[in-house]
Image: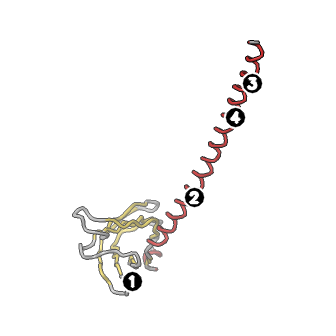
Amino acid sequence: MKYFLILPVSLLLLSCEGTKQDAKAIINESGKAVGQTASEFVDGVSEGVEKTLERDLLISPELQKKGIATGKVVIADDNAGNSNNVLSIYVIFNKDFKGKMTTKVVDKTGKESGRLTQETAAKAGEARYIDFTFDKRTHIDVKSTITVD
């Protein structure tokens, strides 16, 4: 009689273990799908925010002829806690350069709100961030246009 009970109980336990493994696999796959979808959603939102926050950066033809190109532009707060008044431009020097770079900030209504001139020197092939810390009243808005002459 004992043997008759052992066989069905063993089969039941094996069946439960298999079902548990199947359930675990389904949960893992579902988790991966949800994680991927969430990641894609966050990436999409991030791209939308980045696009919204882009500012127009215009490099003068004169500087372009002198081998100046730009990469990333970062807007930050200064050390005194003033908001959005530090402009960091990743500058690529395709030719030797020694001279002044004047950066202007123009707001969305077309009014200039900041101007800085800085002496800069670099060898061809160098690249680095150049920081322009504007007056505390200069706020580089989302729709600002930045020119570098």
> How far apart are the two marked residues, 2 and 3, measured between alpha carbons?
43 Å
Check disc 1 and give the amino acid type. Answer: Lys
Disc 4 packing (10 Å; few <14; some 14–19; many ≥20):
few
Q: Is residue 77 above or below residue 9?
A: below
Q: Which mark is residue 38?
A: none
> How far apart are the two marked residues, 3 and 1, measured between alpha carbons?
75 Å
Whichever of callouts 2 and 4 sits on the residue coming sooner in the sequence is 4
Check disc 2 and give the amino acid type. Answer: Glu
Check disc 4 and give the amino acid type. Answer: Thr
Whichever of callouts 2 and 3 sits on the residue coming sooner in the sequence is 3
Question: The N terminus lies in which quarter of the figure?
Answer: top right
Image x and y of residue 136, in percent: 23, 72
Whichever of callouts 3 and 1 sits on the residue coming sooner in the sequence is 3
Q: Which residue is mark 3?
A: 11
Query: In this view, which residue lies farthest toward the bottom?
Result: 110
Q: Which residue is mark 2?
A: 40
Q: Which residue is mark 4?
A: 19
Name the one closer to the observer, 29 or 149: 29
